[in-house]
Image (spheres, rainbow, N blue to C red):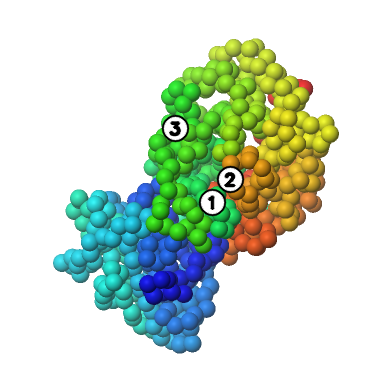
Amino acid sequence: MADASGETVRTSLRIEDYALIGNCETAALVGRNGSIDWLCLPRFDSTACFAALLGDERHGRWLIAPTDEAKGSRRYIPNTMVLETEFETESGRVRVTDFMARRDGATDVGRRVTGLRGTVTMQSELCVRLDYGAVVPWVSRMEDGRIKYVAGPDRLILQSPVPVMNEDMRSRAEFSIAEGEVKDFVLGWSNSFLDAPPPASLEEMLNTVTAGWERWATRFEGVGMWSETVGRSLLTLKALTHYQTGGIVAAPTTSLPEQIGGSRNWDYRYCWLRDATLTLYALMESNFVEEAAAWQGWLLRAVAGDPAQLQIMYGVAGQRRLDEWEVPWLPGYENSAPVRIGNAASGQVQLDVYGEVMDAMYFARQKGLTKTDDVWGVQRAMIDHLTQIWDQPDDGIWEVRGGRKQFTHSKIMAWVAVDRAVRTAEEFGLDGPVAEWKALAATIHAQVCAQGFDAELNSFVQYYGAKTLDASLLLASLVGFLPPEDPRIIGTVAAVERELLSDGFVLRYRTVGDLDGLPEGEGAFLACSFWLADNYVLLGRLDDARTLFERLIGLANDVGLLAEEYDPKARRQVGNFPQAFSHIALINTAFNLARVTGPATQRAEVAHEPV
């Protein structure tokens, strides 16, 4: 289609039409059409040099594809994050291999074009737009023939095996590739104030990257019939992990909408504490002990300090300032505005994070990940602070912006925090006022059961006094607050099935009224649907659990990736993509189904008599 100026711009691909490539420092989204439409350099939370995902090609992208109409198919090389896309035209067939690599001072995107049959005319169009599509770089040719793009501290260098013409502020090339021919392209980022790195050998990089991923993947021992699906989720989780800090970003994207055309568009390129315990279970169950230890290390560094300043999320390196602002020059994915950078929810108060951190630390000690008791002082300080604030309203797990309430899930997780403090002190011989903690845990437990449960609905409710449901209530049995056979848990599961199931998938909550301060409408939250399957496992409803699990993994795109949510009406993925929380939930549910004592059973062990 054409815009007002007459320039042709493309219609957005669906979210599931993208695949992920990454180097454990940053990541890019590659469309089925051969266009890299999203890339932040040099880190997940850096500014984007390709932002066409949230606009069009004028905001930055790199296309390599046939000039003629083509049919495409794609796959990852098994046990890697190396993507192969094959295009077939009337004149032949060609493969584009995409991957990312790291070397000293540089981050590289490698793209190999291989002729498979006949001769195909190809095009390369590179449009570099730094600072989320706003900044046009200065372009020049280097003495060795490479093309350099510079703006401020950023420098990109293109190695092209074919002549490139710079026109209309884009770098274009057209070339033919015959059967058996190979042409290698490399786009590298480095700091503009340092010497330019030497040309890269794509062959060497590709061999190193492929072998590295394959070597990593062999540590996963499988989980029965779902091994391939879980293996792909683990690779995705690894690709979202920063190799130096151990932090795992929730997603590599910002502002992919939870409802197409809506305003529920958030920046997910950060690390959430709510993911802590389930991430550790997923990694440890899958035999990735080093990654679990690195994640725990990130967690400890992030939460260190005054417990009154504990945040719900942090940057990849543990930074706290995640100020939110809107990008006026980007129209948003399929005109879903605004585009947001940063996340104001980082300043919210969420009591559940205390439970997540304490539970994660308890689990880490059980598994031998905590080699020192130095962190116990931090944990005790957190509990001391929680003692003063547990009965106050908060913003809740879903980061609502409609005002604080006495959210039931938040109180349950406050109980988890104190309960895990008791367990840790008693089981590992650590000092603490255990009797006081036990009394506090009993007080919180009794209050939740009295004020968070509605006898008429026969269910726990979203917040004290409410008549509405919340999918986070499904965690009550999964964290051991009450045993799964308790009538109140059974009633809550039934109420969730009755009130929150939408075409077979679980909504977080009904987005009506002014609870979250936003317009109505969002997709089904995939992690919540996996939690329902986990409850089915604990209740012995294994057929229901398997049926729901198979339905959920069937939502993954052709290369096994899941977004945050799914719109059952439009039959498409929505929200930031790929979403670590969705893949973590998938991994844990697979183990819950495949093992007698999966993560849900382990975590649901009840320490004290229920009230």
Q: Residue at x 52, y 50 (%)?
A: 265
Sequence-wise, the earlier of marks 3 and 1 is 1
Q: Is residue 314 left or right of residue 279?
A: left
Query: In the image, residue 263 lies at what x, y percent?
Result: 54, 51
Position of 553 relative to 183 (above/below): above
> Label 2 belongs to which residue?
518
Q: Residue at x 83, y 31 (%)?
A: 455
Query: In the image, residue 182 lies at what x, y percent?
Result: 36, 76
> Label 1 belongs to which residue?
263
- Of circles 3 and 1, the one toward us is 1
Q: Residue at x 43, y 48 (%)?
A: 326
Name the amino acid, label 3: Ala
Q: In this orientation, which residue lies closer to the viewer: 172 or 262?
A: 262
Q: CA distance from mark 3 to mark 1?
A: 30 Å
Sequence-wise, the earlier of marks 2 and 1 is 1
- Of circles 2 and 3, the one toward us is 2
Sequence-wise, the earlier of marks 2 and 3 is 3
- Mark 1 Cα shell of 10 Å, populated few (<14), some (14-19), many (≥20): many
Position of 410 relative to 66 (above/below): above
